[in-house]
Amino acid sequence: MSHTARSPVSNFLNAVLSGIGFGSLYGLVALGLVVIFKSTGILNFSAGALMALGGLVAASMTGNGFWIAAAFAVVVVTVVAGASNVVVMNPLLGRGLFPGVMVTIGLASIVEGISAIKFGARALFLDPPVQNPAIDLPGELTISSTLLVSLVLALSATVVLSIGFQRTGVGLQLRAAAARPEVATMFGANPARIFTYAWAVAGALAAIAGTLLASLTVADMSIAAFAVRAFAAMIVGGVDSLGGAMAGGIMIGVIELLAGTYLGNDYRIPSTMIVLMAFLLLRPSGMFGTPEVVRP
C-alpha cells in the first residue's frame, strides 16, 4: 500500500505525540523514584533492574495475554521490591544516605544477575496490550496504542499517588516518617513498615513501565537503561514532586523524540543529558520541586 508523504507539521506533531507517550513511561518510573525519595530521602538506583525484571517476567508468560502477564509481573516485582527493603534497606535506617544509595546499586546488580540466570541471555517478546498496534488520528497523526495505554496509566497513577500522599493515612505517615522518623514513631507510625509500602509501590510502577517497554521493543536487560531517562525526569520535574516527575518525563520524552527525528537517533540520549545538566546548573530544584529539600 502506498502512503503519501507527511507534511513537516504532521511529522513534528507525530514526534511530539510519540515523545509524550515515551515520556509517560519515563514518568511512571520517576513516580516510583519520587515516592521512595519522599519517604526515605534515598535515590533508588535499582529502578532500572526492576523495570527489566518486570519486562522479562511478563514476556515469559506472553502466551497468557498481555494483561495477565503484566499483572503477574507487577505482583512479582512488587514482592521483590518490598522484600528488598525489608531485608537490606530497613536495617540501614538511621545510618545516613550514602550506605542506602550504595545498597540500591548492589540490589540492581543482584536483580540483574538473578534475571540473567533465570531468563538467559536471549531476548523475549511480549504481545502488545491492544491488538491494533497504532491508532490513526485526524491530521495525519498516529500514536502507538501501547504508548496511549502508557499515558493513561501514567496520568492515573500520578493522580492516585498525589491524592494518596495528601489524603490517606498511609500517605500522611509516609510524609511524617520522611520528615522526622522518631516523631512519627511516637505517634504510632512504623517507619520500617511505611518504607516497605513505598518500595512496593515503586516496584509496581517500575514493573508496569518495564512491561510496556517490553511490548514495544524486546524484553531483556537493556530495558534497565531507560531508567536514566527516569532519573532525568525526576530531577527536571523536582525530586520531591509527583506531578513534576510526570511533567519531567513528558518533557524529556518530547525533547528526546524531537532530537531523534531531526538530528538522528544518536542524539536522543545526549539531548536528555543536556536538559538534565541545564536544570542542575540553572534550576536544581526542578520545575515543581521544593527549592531546598532538607533531609534528616
Image (tube, rainbow, N blue to C red):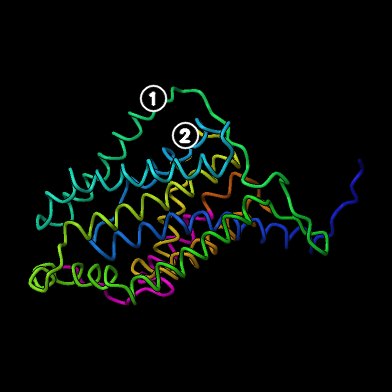
Q: Which is more toward the observer, 251 or 201?
A: 201
Q: Quadrant of the N terminus?
A: top right
Tell me the residue that label 2 is attached to.
56
In the image, residue 81 lies at what x, y percent? 30, 46
Task: Give the magenta part as a residue range.
Answer: 271-296
Q: CA distance from mark 2 to mark 1?
A: 10 Å
- C-beta proximity under 8 Å, tags 2 and 1: yes
Q: Position of residue 141 (x, y in %)?
A: 78, 59
- Residue 213, picture quadrant: top right
Sequence order check, earlier mark of 2 and 1: 2
Quadrant of the rendered image containing residue 49: top left
Given residues 63 and 91, the one toward you in this image is: 63
The 10 Å Cα crowd at callout 2, few under 14, some 14 to 19, many 20 or more, is many
What mark, if any, has residue 118 been given in the picture?
Answer: 1
The reply, left or right, for residue 143 in relation to residue 248 is right
- Which residue corresponds to the image point at 38% horizontal and 25% vertical from the top-left? 118
Residue 277 location, x and y as percent?
A: 42, 61
Identified at 28% across, 66% down, the residue is 38
> In the drawing, what numbered circle is on residue 73?
none
